[in-house]
Image (cartoon, rainbow, N blue to C red):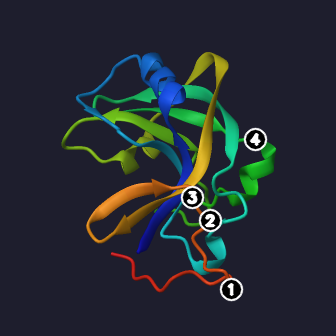
């Protein structure tokens, strides 16, 4: 079992609202809308204490470049400490919290962080749940269950 990344996942009404706010919806709709908090977290970066909990975030900006369409987020103070999504080019700088709503077939969701986000006329609240994206024997899914074992250690995993 591989914990690929962790973050806030938006489903149901929140997902529909996000898509309805896109000014330009691209051909590939991101089917699991989320804000990544950490890609391939280390053992001490797995946040079972908040997994499964709902959090309200604010959509504050919209970005689109013909390849990616997404939103900038404002996280509530209570979970900002868990957001450790650092920029690949500048490891001391956090990426802006964001979600990818849609993209083209030749793009990657990771490019959304580079969009210029225009402020929305007013912030829009959406609610999501903190969870883990799991890869397990060819299956990929969101889990809202603790990842660590009862003794507090994660299962043995190798990142791919």
* Label 2: how many Cα within 10 Å (few below 14, some 14–19, many 20+): few
Q: Nearer the viewer, mark 1 or mark 3?
A: 1
Q: Indicate whether 6 appears above or below 8.
A: below
Task: Name the residue that disc number 3 marks.
Answer: 85
Query: What distance separates the C-alpha of mark 3 from that of mark 4?
Result: 16 Å
Name which residue lies at 39% across and 50% down.
110
Q: Is residue 16 left or right of residue 37?
A: left
Name which residue lies at 40% across and 82% down.
158
Query: What distance separates the C-alpha of mark 2 from that of mark 1?
Result: 32 Å
Name which residue lies at 46% across and 23% down.
16
Q: Indicate whether 75 appears above or below 133.
A: above
Task: Name the residue that disc number 1 marks.
Answer: 151
- The answer to whether residue 94 is visible is yes
Query: What distance separates the C-alpha of mark 2 from that of mark 3?
Result: 10 Å
Circle 2/circle 4 CB separation < 8 Å: no
Task: Count the marks.
Answer: 4
Q: Nearer the viewer, mark 3 or mark 4?
A: 4
In this view, the residue in front, 89 or 17, is: 17
The quadrant in which residue 127 appears is top right
Judging from the image, what secondary structure is the residue with disc 4 in? loop
Q: Indicate whether 11 appears above or below 154.
A: above
């Amino acid at each position: 079992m591989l914990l690929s990344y962790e973050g806030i996942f938006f489903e149901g009404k929140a997902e529909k609202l996000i898509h309805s706010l896109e000014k330009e919806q691209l051909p590939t709709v991101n089917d699991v809308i989320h804000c990544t908090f950490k890609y391939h977290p280390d053992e001490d970066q797995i946040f079972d204490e908040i997994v499964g909990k709902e959090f309200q975030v604010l959509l504050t900006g919209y970005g689109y470049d013909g390849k990616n369409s997404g939103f900038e987020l404002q996280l509530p103070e209570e979970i900002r400490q868990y957001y450790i999504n650092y920029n690949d080019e500048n490891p001391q700088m956090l990426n802006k919290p964001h979600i990818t709503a849609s993209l083209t077939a030749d793009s990657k969701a990771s490019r959304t962080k580079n969009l210029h986000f225009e402020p929305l006329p007013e912030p829009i609240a959406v609610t999501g749940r903190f969870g883990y994206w799991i890869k397990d024997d060819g299956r990929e899914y969101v889990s809202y269950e603790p990842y660590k074992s009862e003794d507090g250690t994660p299962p043995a995993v190798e990142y791919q």
